[in-house]
Image (tube, coloured by chain):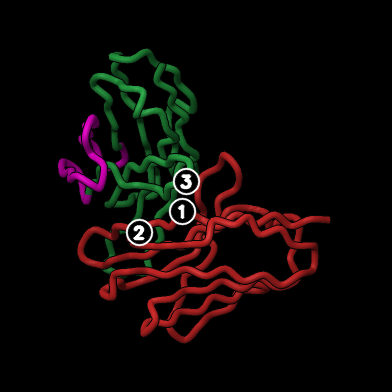
């Protein structure tokens, strides 16, 4: 079983749609959680951290359910520029800040 | 600020050749990491360093060596390149504040092909 699992997609949605991505993680001792965005042939970039209370950044909302070991990302009013791969990332904690990456979910927003 | 800079951006090697990938960061980060990314797989940690002069193995260290002689630089070496090492390599760095919410900052990658 992969430590971080995501639906690879692709998710093809029209502009203006709302789309949700899910992610599960296997290690219950995981300390922190993130969504990174990766454009084609580019480096991953931090989109947002994910907190237990849920957090929002503009059109993006992230949720964490520690009991179910489940993370979600909701994108409202999708833009063409949101087309990218979204990586679910988990930090196991400890002294090294090592991250475990999911394989990513591909989003394609259509005009 | 340049952030995290990787050189070279692209390279083609023949099997058995050696090379070194350079990662440089100007953010005074203590921690540095080397990852590889292959189709259908998430980024996998090759080696990492928690400070100058220290390195440690990650998930997929075989066939690679690293050195961190200066805080700002982290070198990844391939002593005898193999086709299985064809990949995109990313370097990343972060602060060592003990804050698990500390993000990692990535370079823009090195695309390496081994023929």
Using the image, determine if residue B16 lies above or below residue A82: above
Disc 2 to disc 1: CB gap under 8 Å: yes
Disc 1 to disc 3: CB gap under 8 Å: yes
Q: Residues within 10 Å of mark 1 (few under 14, many from 20)?
A: many
Circle 3 residue: B40
Chain identifier matching the red colour in the rendered picture: A
Residue B6: name its quadrant.
Answer: top left
Q: Earlier in the sequence, mark 2 or mark 1?
A: 2
Circle 1 residue: A103
Give the residue displayed 70% in from the left and 54% down from the top: A108
Give the residue displayed 58% in from the left and 53% down from the top: A85
Q: Position of residue B97 (x, y in %)?
A: 28, 65
The residue stretch that appears in magenta: B50-73
Q: Position of residue B32 (x, y in %)?
A: 30, 47
For residue A35, side relative to residue B23 (left or right): right
Give the residue displayed 44% in from the left and 18% down from the top: B12
């Amino acid at each position: 079983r992969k430590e971080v699992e995501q639906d690879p997609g692709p998710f093809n949605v029209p502009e203006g749609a709302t789309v949700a991505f899910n992610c599960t993680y296997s290690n219950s001792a995981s300390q922190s959680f993130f969504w990174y965005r990766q454009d084609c042939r580019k480096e991953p970039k931090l989109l947002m951290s994910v907190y237990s209370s849920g957090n929002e950044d503009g059109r993006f909302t992230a949720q964490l359910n520690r009991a179910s070991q489940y993370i979600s990302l909701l994108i409202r009013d999708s833009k063409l520029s949101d087309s990218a791969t979204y990586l679910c990332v988990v930090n196991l904690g400890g002294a090294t800040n090592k991250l475990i990456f999911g394989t990513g979910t591909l989003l394609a927003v259509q005009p | 600020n340049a952030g995290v800079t990787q050189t070279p951006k692209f390279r083609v090697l023949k099997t058995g050749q050696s090379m070194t990938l350079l990662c440089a960061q100007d953010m005074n980060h203590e921690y540095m990491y080397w990852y590889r990314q292959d189709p259908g797989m998430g980024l996998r940690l090759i080696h990492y360093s928690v400070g100058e002069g220290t390195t440690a193995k990650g998930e997929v260290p075989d066939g690679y060596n690293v050195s961190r002689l200066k805080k700002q630089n982290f070198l990844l070496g391939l002593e005898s390149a193999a086709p299985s090492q064809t990949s995109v390599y990313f370097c990343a760095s972060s602060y060592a504040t003990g804050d698990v919410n500390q993000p990692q900052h990535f370079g823009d990658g090195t695309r390496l092909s081994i023929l």
